[in-house]
Image: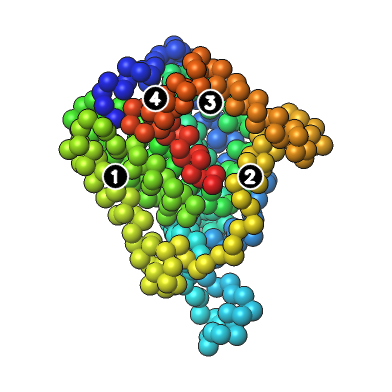
Amino acid sequence: MTASDSTELPSGGNDCLSAKARRFFLAGVALYVCLFGFNSLARMRNFSPDSIGYVDAARNMVAGHGFSTSIHTVEELEALADARRPAPLTIWPPLYPLLVAALSMVGLSAPDAALVVTVLSGGLILLATYLLARTLFDELVACASVAVLLVCGHFVRVVSFAWSEPTAIACALFSLFFMVRPREKGGERIWAPLLAGLFAGLAFATRYGMLPLAVVGVVAQLERKDAKRTAASLALFLGGFLVLAGPVVGRNLALSGHLLGPPRPPSDRGLLRNLFDLYASMASYWLPRPVLHGLLQVLLFWVAAIYLGVRLCRKRFRHAFRAAFREVTCDGRRGLLALWFAGYLI
């Protein structure tokens, strides 16, 4: 991104709050995370079927068996000569079980460590959301974004289970933050794309579904009027990404013959179904259940959303489309969020 980009957007970090109000708000968020963590460990203790696999993989790491699993299907048990020997695990990336194993080695049990990693990741999600919104808008929007997350049932559910999604989301948000951060100083031109690539690699090493983030990162480094700077930024971003994603892909190829681990059954959900699920998820707190499952209501929802989006542009549709295209390509930073959202949704 060029230095002139910052003139097209509100300068990130505008101080809309006093220092006292900022400290009070951040202290309240920190207290919330601490209380939520206590509640998660002492009372809720939510574990999904995937959580069992993650905890098992972490225990095998601590025992010196590497990234492996002791849980086998009936077919695997018949094929294995020694069913007691852990088998290499490739269906999931290794970062989340590795973090659980690291906490287990300092005294926590593996189940408790899995919950702690999730809660800490939830806190990092809030921090990354604050930084990202503050960079793109201002401090008031950043605080409002964090406040909305704190009362959002979907966020609370995601960070209350011992699974890898919160860690992957936190890494993805930090990667997006370094993608959109203005690079007006010489040093920032080096470490910003590098850190964006490293966090994108961490996200991929946590969830294979974060792979589209690499495409968004490549787009973020493009600059129409500075080919040398574009090449340098691309090299730094891809280098940071491949340092962490490369070993995961190489291990998968060696053990399973596939880039993303063993092949999965073909998905029965296309783009339209994903859009419907998005509508149902976003509207589930404000609309009655019968409305959520009507095709007409879904169509009206999207028509209204598109209409309002066009009207908010305050331009003709053609000019708005061109402006949106420029935002997603080289001129803007907010459009990268839309590009990432579309890639992850599809």
| Spot occupied by residue 121 in the image (x, y as percentages of width and height) | 49, 43
**Residue 332 against residue 41 in the figure, above or below:** above
Q: 294 or 95, which is in the foreground?
A: 294
In whole angstroms, how far apart are the C-alphas of marks 3 and 1?
Answer: 27 Å
Secondary element at tag 3:
helix
Indicate the amino acid at tag 2: Leu
Residue to which mark 3 is pinned: 145
Residue to which mark 1 is pinned: 237
Horizontal arrangement in the rendering, residue 40 relative to residue 164 (left or right): right
In whole angstroms, how far apart are the C-alphas of marks 2 and 4?
Answer: 32 Å
First in sequence: mark 2 or mark 3? Answer: 3
Indicate the amino acid at tag 1: Phe
Q: Badges 3 and 4: C-beta atoms under 8 Å apart? A: no
- Closer to the camera: disc 2 or disc 3? 2
- Closer to the camera: disc 3 or disc 1? 1
Q: At 38% from the left edge and 19% from the top edge, which residue is drawn? A: 9
Q: 61 or 301, which is in the foreground?
A: 301
